[in-house]
């Protein structure tokens, strides 16, 4: 795997500091420095302590990460919205699990991506899911095709600089066009459902009312934190559980799973420094 950047600063800068500014984590830099990669400036191999000058190209070469043999290969289909050397954006249908687990060992998004990379003869067969969705939540997932991409995007994820928007159908009518739910979410041992609790992790959900009927409202939702079941927990907490969400008290008379879709994702590509934005068409259940 090889990536090149042209340094646009005005003063000399050490390779490590420059790569950190781009988003590279400390652990990956050390791995590269200690034999798992190499650094080139103007196409010449240099020490990791080298300073680069304005407008000089820096190339990073990294060894492929060993494949995870516990992840089976699946040839089941993927809906690919976008693909380049570093990223895959997948439109996941509701009902497909993101990663293998005790109850689903194969056929997940991760299994399918591994199979897809194999058909491309990729040297990197250990993809990393940057975003995940519950099994019955459909929509956009971002996948890093190799460990360098995973490291480079992690800072945006941790600092909540990646835009993630969802569309949901909730029960009842909202009185406001816009609102913010700021309630900590906790896990309780032995329970699948998360709860609102003072000892929980900070969770912040922003929403906009888009359309509503006599007993439902369609909302656009933006996550400012990334807690498990965050949207489902928060709307249940304000008395408007998602339609179909049996775990949190939603109306299941028409749908047997939550009506929730990851409809938009936007992030700065740390390799090109361009903003990438993707949207997903809503399933028909949102218009019925």
Image (cartoon, rainbow, N blue to C red):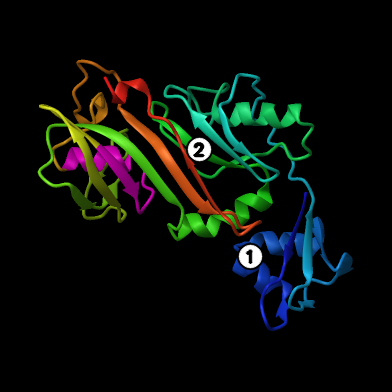
Query: Which secondary structure lies at badge 2?
Result: strand
Q: State the residue at coordinates (35%, 21%).
A: 284
Left or right for 276, reference 214: right
Report the magenta residues as a range: 219-237
Above or below, 171 relative to 174: above
Question: Tag 2: Cα neighbours inside 10 Å, few (<14), some, or many (≥20)?
Answer: many
Above or below, 220 relative to 93: below
Residue 257 seen anywhere in this rendered image of the structure:
no
| Residue 194, label in figure | none
Sequence-first disc among 1 and 2: 1
Q: Residue furthest right?
A: 44
Quadrant occupied by the C terminus = top left
Residue 72's x, y, as percent?
A: 65, 25
Q: State the residue at coordinates (21%, 40%).
A: 235
Above or below, 226 relative to 99: below
Q: Give the spatial CA distance, label 1 vs label 2.
A: 25 Å
Question: Tag 1: Cα neighbours inside 10 Å, few (<14), some, or many (≥20)?
Answer: few
Residue corresponding to mark 1 = 26
Does residue 190 show up magenta in the picture?
Answer: no
Q: Are marks 1 and 2 in contact (CB under 8 Å)?
A: no
- For the residue pair 91 and 250, the one nearer the viewer reads as 91
Query: Which secondary structure lies at badge 1?
Result: helix
Q: Residue 217 sits in which quadrant? A: top left
- For the residue pair 247 and 219, the one nearer the viewer reads as 219
Q: State the residue at coordinates (66%, 77%).
A: 9
Residue corresponding to mark 2 = 141
Residue 200's x, y, as percent?
A: 28, 52
Q: State the residue at coordinates (25%, 47%).
A: 207
- For the residue pair 102 and 139, the one nearer the viewer reads as 139
Q: Residue furthest bottom?
A: 11
């Amino acid at each position: 795997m090889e990536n090149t950047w042209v340094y646009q600063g005005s003063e000399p800068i050490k390779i490590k500091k420059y790569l950190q500014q781009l988003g590279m984590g400390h652990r990956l830099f050390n791995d590269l420095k200690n034999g798992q990669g190499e650094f080139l400036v103007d196409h010449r191999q240099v020490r990791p302590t080298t300073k680069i000058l304005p407008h000089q190209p820096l190339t990073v070469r990294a060894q492929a990460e060993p494949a995870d043999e516990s992840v089976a290969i699946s040839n089941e289909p993927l809906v690919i919205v976008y693909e380049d050397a570093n990223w895959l954006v997948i439109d996941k249908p509701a009902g497909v699990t993101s990663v293998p687990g005790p109850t689903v060992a194969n056929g997940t998004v991760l299994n399918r991506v591994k199979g897809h990379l194999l058909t491309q003869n990729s040297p990197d067969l250990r993809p990393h899911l940057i975003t995940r969705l519950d099994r019955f939540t459909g929509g956009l997932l971002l996948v890093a095709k190799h460990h360098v991409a995973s490291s480079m995007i992690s800072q945006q994820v941790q600092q909540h600089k990646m835009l993630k928007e969802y569309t949901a159908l909730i029960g009842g009518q909202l009185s406001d066009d816009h609102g913010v739910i700021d309630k900590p979410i906790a896990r309780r041992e032995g329970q699948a459902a998360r709860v609102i609790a003072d000892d929980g992790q900070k969770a912040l959900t922003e929403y906009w009312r888009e359309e509503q009927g006599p007993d439902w409202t369609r909302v656009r939702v933006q996550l400012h934190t990334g807690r498990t079941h965050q949207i489902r927990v928060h709307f249940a907490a304000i008395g408007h559980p998602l339609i179909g969400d049996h775990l949190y008290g939603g109306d299941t008379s028409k749908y047997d799973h939550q009506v929730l879709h990851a409809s938009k994702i936007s992030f700065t590509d740390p390799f090109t420094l361009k903003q990438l934005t993707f949207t997903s068409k809503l399933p028909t259940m949102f218009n019925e």
